[in-house]
Amino acid sequence: MKAGIVGLPNVGKSTLFNCLSNAKAQSANFPFCTIEPNIGVVNVPDSRIEKLEELVKPERVQMATVDIVDIAGLVKGASKGEGLGNQFLGNIRECNAIIHVLRCFDNDNIVHVDGNVNPIRDKETIDIELQLKDLENVEKRLEKVKRAAKTGNKEAIVEEALLNRIRETLLQAKSARTITPQNNDEEVLMEGFQLITAKPVLYVCNVDENSAVNGNKYVDQVRELVKDEDAEVIVLSVGAEADITELESYEERQVFLEDMGLQEPGASVLIRAAYKLLKQQTYFTAGVKEVRAWTIDVGSTAPQAAGVIHTDFEKGFIRAEVIAYEDFVHYGSEAKCKEAGKFKVEGKEYIVKDGDVMHFRFNV
């Protein structure tokens, strides 16, 4: 599962990507600096794994990760191939969610592709290009499905009706994510269409250092604009985050954060939000060899969770031994959880909860 960072050129995308990952995307004060999409495998900050490490004292620790993709800046006309449009739109299509970076700071030394700072206009520029590309694909698909619908094909009739709803929505300059599928068939179809504007989105307002805690007028404008979108807005000073990553020690970073009035780097908040946006959650395995966070889709069953470790675990699944994270921390060990009756044995139907500490029994 991948979250792609999008936005106009020079809004801070590559600098943000550098803060999030160990990879070093080129960052410069001109458009089209990032041409190939850079992919960073980023650890998901989680205080729970630190607590488990403290209790179990394992030989090694493995955190959950999320893939973040740095995609080059879109410009007006991208849907028609302007700039590096087709390539960028293809890169976005391959992602599962969108992190949309908006410039919400004034700085005469950093060129704005449209001449002045206006995050509302910038958001609309990106939205329109993505909507136009989706509209093009929807209309092509409609041409094909109409022929089948005329013959009385029931599946084609359902698909045609949904495509027409999507088309009308896009023509009103609204994104496909605003459409609620009316039944399971429509849900499956929507997923199959792979529309860019159907992907979940998270807005990142890139502000100056002084606005990192409370935001500014630009942030207020963005929040007002997206209030009906069911989308999260995160305020981040990308420049300050870049400075934090340059500091050598944990203590230095904490002093810097305290001076800014922050409890943790904004990048950590963003990574967790991206993880949630991708509808991912974590379960843990905790033994003396390794304490590890495993990433699964929200709603996964115990066999599906086991399959993330190894396909054989899913094929030969017998049962899952489960301790809630809070119980494990409260009692301090698996043995004490058993004594307290907090050790559960679950079967194939069990839906894994975020934070479960699990051990699987299987036979292949």
Image (cartoon, helix red, strand yellow):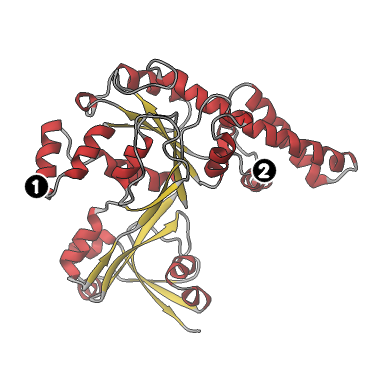
| Rendered location of residue 341, percent (x, y) | 27, 70
Q: Are marks 2 and 1 in contact (CB under 8 Å)?
A: no
Tell me which amino acid carries mark 1: Glu
- Please state the horizontal and vertical placement of residue 361, each as a whole percent of the image: 41, 79
Q: Residue at x 77, y 36 (%)?
A: 142
Q: Nearer the viewer, residue 333 or 286?
A: 286
State the residue at coordinates (63%, 21%).
Answer: 172
Q: Is residue 337 left or right of residue 321?
A: left
Viewer-proximal residue among 242 and 203: 242
Q: Position of residue 304 (x, y in %)?
A: 49, 66
Q: Quadrant of residue 337?
A: bottom left
Residue 149 horizontal side relative to residue 358, left or right:
right
Looking at the image, which residue sits at the far right? 151
The amino acid sitting under disc 2 is Glu
Q: Disc 2 or 1, which lies upstream in sequence?
A: 2
Q: Nearer the viewer, mark 2 or mark 1?
A: 1
| Residue position for label 2 | 186
Outermost residue, bottom direction? Answer: 364
User: Is residue 210 shown above or below 156?
Assistant: above
The kind of secondary structure element at disc 2 is: helix
**230 relative to 328, above or below:** above
Which residue is disc 1 drawn over? 251
Q: Nearer the viewer, residue 334 or 155?
A: 155
Please rate how many residues cluster around mark 2, counting C-alpha atoms within 10 Å: few if below 14, some from 14 to 19, many from 20: some
Give percent across and percent down for residue 48.
24, 57
Placement of 28 over or under 318, stated as above or below: above
